[in-house]
Image: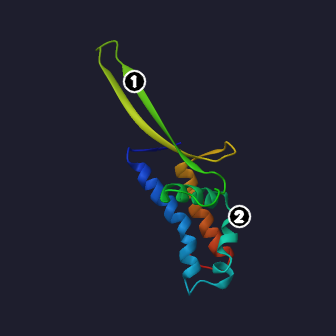
C-alpha cells in the first residue's frame, strides 16, 4: 500500500493525468511512427494500468464526464492512525499515515504507487512494441 504524506493526493492526480495524456503527445508528434501514433487509442486499451490512469485522469480533471469510465478507476484514500501508550512513563504518541489505492468497478484494488510504476512500464512496452523509442 502506497503511504504518502498529506497533500500527496494532488501529485497522484497530476501523475495519472499526465500519464494518460501522453497518448495525445504521441498522436501529435510528427516524429512518432505511424504504427504507434495512428492507433495509440487502441494500443492503450491493451493495458489495465493505462485504462485506470485514464479513469483517474478524467475523473479528477473534468467537472462532469461526458462518457462512461473505462474500468471505473477511482482513488481510494485510507487514513491509518497508530497510537502507542507507555505504561512506564504514561506518555502517548500517535502517527498518522495516508495510503492511496486505485479501485475499479469490479472491486479490484491496486496500490497507487505500484499502479503508477506499472503504467510507466506499460508505456515503455507499448511505445517500443509499436515502433517508437523511449
Where is residue 97? Give x, y as percent. Answer: 42, 37
* Residue occupying image coordinates x 38% and y 44%: 6
Where is residue 127? Give x, y as percent. Answer: 62, 74
Q: Is disc 2 placed on a helix, strand or loop?
A: loop
C-alpha span from label 1 to label 2? 44 Å
Q: Is disc 1 placed on a helix, strand or loop?
A: strand
Q: Residue 46 bears which disc, if any?
A: 2
Using the image as rendered, state which of residue 124 and residue 44 is in the foreground: 44
Using a 10 Å C-alpha cutoff, classify the residue at mark 2 as few (fewer than 14 neighbours), some (14 to 19) or many (20 or more). Answer: few
Where is residue 82? Give x, y as percent. Answer: 42, 27
* Residue occupying image coordinates x 60% and y 67%: 123
> To which residue does mark 1 refer?
83
Using a 10 Å C-alpha cutoff, classify the residue at mark 1 as few (fewer than 14 neighbours), some (14 to 19) or many (20 or more). Answer: few
72 left or right, relative to 95: right
Location of residue 18 with respect to 34 vertically, above or below: above
36 left or right, relative to 18: right
Q: Residue furthest bottom?
A: 30
Where is residue 46, by image quadrant?
A: bottom right
83 left or right, relative to 115: left
Camera-side mark, 1 or 2: 2
Location of residue 70 with respect to 77 vertically, above or below: below
Where is residue 91? Give x, y as percent. Answer: 29, 18
Query: Which is nearer the N-term, disc 1 or disc 2?
Result: 2
* Residue occupying image coordinates x 34% and y 16%: 86
Amino acid at each position: 500500500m502506497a503511504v504518502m504524506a498529506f497533500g500527496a493526493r494532488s501529485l497522484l492526480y497530476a501523475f495519472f493525468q499526465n500519464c494518460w495524456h501522453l497518448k495525445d503527445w504521441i498522436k501529435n508528434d510528427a516524429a512518432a511512427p505511424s504504427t504507434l501514433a495512428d492507433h495509440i487509442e487502441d494500443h492503450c486499451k491493451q493495458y489495465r494500468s493505462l485504462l485506470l490512469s485514464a479513469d483517474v485522469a478524467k475523473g479528477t480533471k473534468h467537472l462532469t464526464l461526458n462518457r462512461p469510465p473505462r474500468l471505473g478507476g477511482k482513488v481510494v484514500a485510507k487514513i491509518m492512525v497508530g497510537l502507542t501508550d507507555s505504561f512506564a512513563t504514561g506518555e502517548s504518541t500517535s502517527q498518522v499515515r495516508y495510503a492511496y489505492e486505485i479501485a475499479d468497478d469490479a472491486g479490484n484494488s491496486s496500490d497507487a504507487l505500484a499502479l503508477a510504476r506499472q503504467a510507466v512500464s506499460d508505456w515503455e512496452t507499448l511505445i517500443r512494441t509499436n515502433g517508437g523509442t523511449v
